[in-house]
């Protein structure tokens, strides 16, 4: 059972520039990863920490994750909650990420076009 009023930390996994940006903003648990395998190792460690509530990861790394358990956590875990953000060069992923976050939060697809 979660403690009422508990506070959690944010962690970030991505390119060196993403990691640096999060560190500058005060996120102390930010990591640079070059591959999905490297990100998997970082995620395994973060999921063992009770005080991590949100893990931000780039879409490229999320797509490269091969471990089924970790991949399922990235797409469906509520604690820690994973937020997949677009890579610097991937502008097409923005709408997909926003849609996924809305569906996850509300349980419905409010951006679905009516036929």
Image: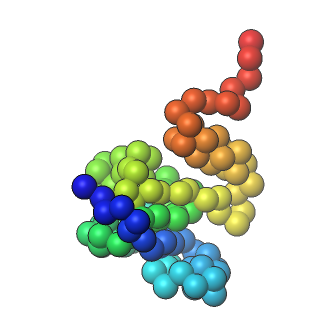
Where 62 sits versus 68, above or below? below
Q: How many marks?
A: 0
Residue at x 33% of width, y 55% of height: 70
Q: Where residue 1 appears, x then y in whole percent?
A: 25, 55
Tell me residue 21's x, y (percent): 64, 81
- Residue extending farthest front: 4
Query: From the image, which quarter does the C terminus lie in?
Result: top right
Mark yes or no: residue 1 visible: yes
Figure check: 33 above or below 57 = below
Q: Is residue 66 visible?
A: no
Q: Residue at x 29, y 70 (%)?
A: 50
Q: What is the basis of the colouring in this image? A: rainbow
Q: Find the residue positioned furthest to the top.
A: 115
Quarter of the image holding residue 19?
Answer: bottom right
- Picture layout, residue 41 above or below residue 98: below
Residue at coordinates 63% horizontally, 87% vertically from top-left?
24
Q: Image quarter for residue 15? A: bottom right
Residue 2 or residue 68, whichever sits in front: 2
Q: On the rendered structure, is 52 left or right of 10?
A: left
The image position of residue 31, as x and y in percent, is 47, 79
Would residue 52 be found to the left or right of residue 20 on screen? left
Front in this rendered view, residue 29 or 39: 29
Along the horizontal axis of the image, is 98 left or right of 31? right
Q: Residue at 40% of width from left, 66% of height from top? A: 5
């Amino acid at each position: 059972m979660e403690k009422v009023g508990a506070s959690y930390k944010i962690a970030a996994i991505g390119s060196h520039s993403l990691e640096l940006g999060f560190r500058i903003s005060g996120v102390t648990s930010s990591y640079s990863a070059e591959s999905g395998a490297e990100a998997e190792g970082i995620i395994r460690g973060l999921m063992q920490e009770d005080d991590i509530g949100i893990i931000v990861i780039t879409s490229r790394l999320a797509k490269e994750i091969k471990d089924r358990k970790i991949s399922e956590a990235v797409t469906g875990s509520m604690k820690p909650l994973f937020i997949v953000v677009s890579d610097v060069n991937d502008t097409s992923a923005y709408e997909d990420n926003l849609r996924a976050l809305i569906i996850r939060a509300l349980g419905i697809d409010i951006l679905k076009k009516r036929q």
